[in-house]
């Protein structure tokens, strides 16, 4: 059961990691093809998220890149929807949020994906870390209890704390439908992840979830 859940989570997060990664011509071609729509529709139905009914891809790769940048990376005074946990955390300094992320990553030997130069609290880095935890759980190289506690702590503190706010901002600022769907899917996935992780952690600790 834990391995099956790990496989399912890895598939969901790997899809989101690829879909919300920096735009490339290959990613644009994927968005424009039937496989991407089929996978997105399946996940939206699974998590109860409204389907993206319109066109998912921009007209060309240049437009795809420009659209991503305009949504997530540039704007006055800030991008419409920054993909940074620290942006949505008004209680703690940015330096503290990043430091806590780094402590989690170092503990489990997580490294940013090749070519990823984003801050430690960027969504892409967070998703890569969650995939890493499931890889460790599946491989059995780290005690399962340790991995589950780390996952619960990370999601409680950071990973599940801000995607719902980003999804709401995407809807409020009328981002392209594909990005609204992806961020709503992200919010639903991490919320479910936290709920599913809370029960085994509580059982091990003799606590109520």
Image (cartoon, rainbow, N blue to C red):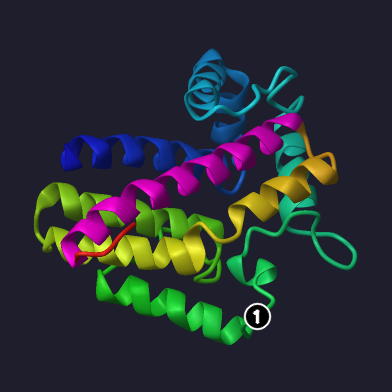
Residue identifier under label 1:
91
Q: Position of residue 65 (x, y in %)?
A: 71, 42
Q: How many marks?
A: 1
Q: Is residue 159 magenta?
A: no
- Vertical comparison of 193 with 156: above or below: above
Q: Which quadrant would residue 20 be assigned to in this image?
A: top right
Task: From the viewer's perspective, tell me whether residue 166 is left or right of residue 22.
Answer: right
In percent of the image, x 37 and y 59: which residue is there?
Answer: 129
Q: Position of residue 158 (x, y in %)?
A: 50, 66
Q: Which quadrant would residue 49 be assigned to in this image?
A: top right
Q: Position of residue 88 (x, y in %)?
A: 67, 67
In percent of the image, x 44 and y 53: which residue is there?
Answer: 127
In percent of the image, x 85 and y 60: which residue is there?
Answer: 75
Which residues are the magenta region? 177-205
Q: From where the camera sits, is residue 116 visible?
A: no
Q: Position of residue 160 (x, y in %)?
A: 51, 57
Q: Is residue 198 magenta?
A: yes
Task: From the viewer's perspective, tell me whether residue 193 is left or right of residue 51.
Answer: left
Locate the C terminus by quadrant.
bottom left
Please identify the dominant SS of the magenta region.
Answer: helix
Q: Nearer the viewer, residue 81 or 143?
A: 143
In percent of the image, x 68 and y 38: which residue is there?
Answer: 179
Q: Which quadrant would residue 78 be assigned to in this image?
A: bottom right
- Vertical comparison of 106 with 206: above or below: below
Locate the N terminus by quadrant.
top left
Task: From the viewer's perspective, tell me whether residue 98 is left or right of residue 167.
Answer: left
Q: From where the camera sits, is residue 74 visible?
A: yes
Identify the element where label 1 is drawn: loop
**Mark 1 neighbour class, 10 Å CA radius: few under 14, some 14 to 19, many 20 or more:** few
Q: Nearer the viewer, residue 69 or 108?
A: 108
């Amino acid at each position: 059961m834990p391995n099956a859940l790990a496989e399912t989570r890895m598939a969901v997060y790997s899809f989101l990691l690829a879909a919300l990664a920096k735009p490339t011509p290959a990613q644009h071609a994927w968005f424009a093809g039937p496989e991407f729509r089929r996978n997105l529709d399946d996940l939206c139905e699974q998590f109860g998220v409204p389907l993206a009914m319109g066109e998912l891809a921009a007209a060309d790769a240049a437009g795809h890149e420009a659209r991503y940048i305009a949504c997530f990376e540039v704007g006055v005074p800030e991008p419409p929807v920054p993909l940074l946990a620290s942006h949505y955390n008004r209680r703690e300094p940015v330096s503290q949020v990043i430091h806590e992320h780094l402590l989690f990553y170092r503990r489990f030997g997580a490294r940013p994906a090749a070519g990823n130069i984003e801050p430690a609290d960027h969504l892409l880095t967070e998703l890569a870390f969650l995939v890493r935890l499931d890889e460790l759980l599946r491989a059995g190289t780290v005690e399962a209890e340790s991995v589950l506690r780390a996952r619960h702590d990370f999601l409680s503190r950071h990973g599940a704390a801000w995607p719902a706010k980003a999804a709401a901002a995407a809807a409020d600022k009328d981002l392209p439908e594909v990005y609204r769907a992806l961020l709503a899917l992200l919010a639903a996935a991490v919320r479910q992840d936290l709920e599913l992780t809370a029960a085994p952690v509580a059982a091990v600790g003799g606590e109520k979830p």
